[in-house]
Structure formats: C-alpha cells, structure tokens
Image (cartoon, rainbow, N blue to C red):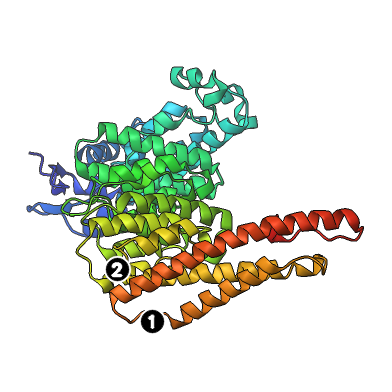
Amino acid sequence: MDVSCDLEVDVNGEEIFIVDKNVICSYSGRINKLFGKRKRGTKYLKVIFHDFPGGAESFELITRFCYNKGKIEINHINVSTLYCAACYMEMEKSVSGNQNLFELTENLLADIRYWTWSELLDALKQCQNLIPVASSSGVIDKYLDSLIGRVASSCETSPCPSTSSADSSGFRLSCDSKSTESFKNSTFRATWWFEDLAAFEPFLIDILVKQMVSRNLDHGILSKFLFYYQKSRFASAKTMDEKCKTMETVIEMLYLLDLSCISFKTLFGMLRITLNLKISKCSRNKLESMIGSLLDQATLDNLLLPSPVGSSYLYDVNLVLRLLKSFISKGACCVPLTRLRKVASLIDLYIVEVAPDPCLKPSKFLALVKSLPESARDSYDAIYHATVMYFEVHSGLCEEEKMKICSGLNYEKLSSEACNHLAQNKKFPSKSAGQALITQQVKLKSLLQETNQASPYVDSHCSFAEAENTGKEDQQIVLYAGKLDLSTENEKLKVHLQGMQCRVLELEKVCRKMQNQMAKMLKSRVSSHNNARSLPRLCS
C-alpha cells in the first residue's frame, strides 16, 4: 500500500477508506482542523464518522473530487448528496483557494428553476436519506420552495405551465406523460401532484404541508391530499409502525387546517382505522377534537363504534362522551342553538340504542343524558323511553340508583302521555312518579289560569257554571297534592297517585270542553265588535 495513504476513515460503520491526509486536508476544513498540523509519520491516523451524509457512497464521491483536483460530474441525482457532504466536510473556497465542492453544488442549486419536475422529485427523494444534514443546510427548503411554487402556479394558470418562458413564469415545469395526462382534464388541475408526492416519507410531508400552509395554499386541496397520502401509504406499508407514523403525521397536518375544509366522513373513517392502531395519545386527542367540533354532521351509524378490546360493554360510550366534550368545549352558550339541538337529537337516538346494554353502568347512562344542557331538548320523551328500557334490563338497581338516573329527566318537558305512563310504571321509583304527576298538575293549573284570563271577552250574561266547577276541581287537586306525603308507605302512596291521576284526567276533559265553549263565544264576539283582539294562545 502507498505510504502516502496515512489516514483511515470509518464511514458510518459501512466501509473503511485509506486516503492521503494532505490531499483531503487541502479541500476539507473539517479534516484540516483535525489533522492539518500533524506531520507525516509511520502510523496511520484514524477518524470515525457516525453520521456522514449519504454514507460510504457519498464519501467515495468526496475522495474522487479531492484526488481529481476539483473535477467531478454533478447532476440533479447526486447534487443533494454532494451538497450535504460538502457542508459536513466544510469544503469551502477559503480552504483550497479555488472553487470548491460547496460552491459548485450551490451554483447548480441556484438554477433549480430550470429543473424538470422529475428532476426535482428525484432530488427530494435523495434528501430523504440525508436528514438531518439536509434540513440544517437548507437544501430541502430550496427544493420545497420550488416545488410549492410550481404546485401553486399550476392551480392558478393555464393547464400547461411548461409552455411559459423561464422569465415569465419563474420556472420550467416538464409536461411529462403523467403530468400532461392529468392536465388534460381540468378536474385534476389542482390535484395532479398527489400521486408524485405520495412517495415521500412522513417527515418530509410534515415539512412540505407546513410550508404549503404558510404559503396560503387552499386548505380543501391540502386536506384531500393528506387523505390521499394516508390511503396510498397504508396500501404499501409493511409494518404497523409505518401505518402509525403515517396516521400521526396526517392527523398533525389536518389539525393545522380550517375545519370547514375537511371532510367529516373521511375523518370518521380515519377514526375507525385508528381503533386498530396504537397511535400516540396526542394524535388521538387531536383527531377526536376535530370530529367532536363537527359532531352535528354525524349520523347514528358514525357513533355506534364497538368498545375497545377487553371492555365488557357493547359500544364505546366513553368515546362519544369525549366527542360531546369537544363539541361544547367553548361552552354550550357559544354553540348555535340549531347545531346544539341537532346534536341533542342524535344523542337521544344513541342513548336509546345503548340503553339495553346490560353492561352499561348507571353513571355512564346518566353522563350521556346530562352531557348537553336542558335547553338543547324541547322534549324529554326519548330520554324517558330510554330510561324505561334501561330499568327493564337493569332490574337489580336499588331505589337510590334509580333516583339518580331519574335526575336526568326534565319532568316539565315530558308529554302528558309520558307522565301518565311513568305513574303506572312499577319499575320507576314512587318519588319520581309523584314528581311527574305534580308537574303535570302545575301545567294544568297554569293552563286554567290562562283560560280564566280570557273571561273579560265574554258577555256578562254568559253562564260560567262549568268554569266554576272547574275551579272547584282545581282546588280539590291542589288540596289533594298538598296532603300528599311522599314519605309514606308505598301502598298508601300508590292510592294517592291513582287518585291524582283520575283527577288529572277529569280536569283535562273539563279543559277541552271549556276550550270549545270559549272558542264559540269569542267567534260570536269578534263578529259583533270591531275592536276585537286576537285569539288567546289557549284557543289557537
């Protein structure tokens, strides 16, 4: 072996090179700092590189450049590797006094606007093996800046930007067979680049999309690309780790976009996929937050997701509770009432669906009922019917547990039919049944008061016999309710409740009869008086 080869270089453990120290030092500032002042001796000097850009193949190009006195063929395929290696080896002009490798590669990169689209893609693929040096040197930013400019321009200009001159357009985009075929159909003008960029690794997509967002590219197009990227990468992924990394990257990027530009259906599709993936908790929370914010677009089928493996209950109730929490994260008062009621209707359907699950705990059932404010519902009949089913399946509940569940009912928003059904339902606690009937009594009393207020419109000679009878009935019910003692024995309480129910039914008949009579009287009054007022709400 030539005695002048006195430097041993171990490149990333891949290969060992024996080179002339003085030759390498004349071009490399890094090697010059390490061994430049050492005199030639009989022993070899040795240096170990653990993170050399491009590995052994790249170092071999460097040695060729040094031994050929700065002469080497550089093209778009190896320029990325040589640029990063030159930065790593500190091969600047100040070292050799002549144009060095760093200047040569930098000059080639300065003409990047003349590269074809395929050359640009090849260069970026090379950079994927040069991280983190490629990032720190800025070469990736140069490529991405050119790439994003071409994508943005193609969405705004004519279908074939390559026909424009370099001076007018700022770049030359090759109309290769793939791009030309896409451009022929204007529908694909904004998405022609999806397939090409789907070949990149997730970390490069992360950098790419962030720069696209900063350049104000259309968020709708970006969300479609990310969904396309996820589907494409999953089709070629060989391990679960690859799928997890892809999914996490896509979720992180979607989280940067305007939610109104993201497909809710596709988001839920991603959620179903993640049920079988062990993605990070942070990414999962972000995905659920996006879905929760758009929950008013969901359907019952979307929510009926199976419970996690190892759980005894049928559906993933905890997930739905988290989605509801995200939906009202800024406060229910900040959510438009129309959206709030739409979600309430959806959740009512969901509660009815999960109520028969024998493994659903009372705390979870009640949490679903109370997850939204009472203002979100006009009627609590659906909640009542779900509670009936829950009590039927969970027959072993004690009175205290049943009363806790009944605390989720708003008796004032129950229909008369629901209240009557509740009073006769032996599965419900006696206190709950009594409260329902008393609430109905208060409603009827209020109804009678509104009816009595209509009396000034009736002629003084009209008979009020039935109205007086109704007043007596009302007083009897009030008196009866006042004597009702909910703490008495169950049998005695049932007798009281049955009595109240009969009186309520009688009072309803009287009210209907009185409404008909009042309507006839007011019609005749309107025909005889010009200053007649509009009908009361009771008679409408």
Residue visible at 48% across and 46% down in the picture: 297
Along the horizontal axis of the image, is 263 left or right of 451? left
Along the horizontal axis of the image, is 290 left or right of 230? right
Along the horizontal axis of the image, is 131 left or right of 292? left
Compared with 312, 232 (above or below) is: above
Quadrant of the rendered image containing residue 289: bottom left
Residue visible at 53% across and 50% down in the picture: 214
State the CA–CA distance, disc 2 to disc 1. 20 Å
Secondary structure type for disc 2: helix
Depth check: 485 or 35 in front? Answer: 485
Q: Is residue 348 visible?
A: yes
Secondary structure type for disc 1: loop
Q: Which residue is mark 2?
A: 402
Compared with 426, 252 (above or below) is: above
Going from N to C along the chain, the mark reached first, 2 or 1, is 2
Q: Position of residue 25 (x, y in %)?
A: 26, 50
- For label 2, count other residues whose C-alpha is less than 10 Å away and answer few (under 14), some (14-19) or many (20+): many
- Say which amino acid is labelled 1: Asp
- Say which amino acid is labelled 2: Lys
Residue visible at 21% across and 56% down in the picture: 359
Q: Is residue 83 visible?
A: no
Along the horizontal axis of the image, is 524 left or right of 198? right
The N terminus - image quarter: top left
- For label 1, count other residues whose C-alpha is less than 10 Å away and answer few (under 14), some (14-19) or many (20+): few
Q: Which residue is mark 1?
A: 485
Q: Position of residue 357 (x, y in %)?
A: 24, 52
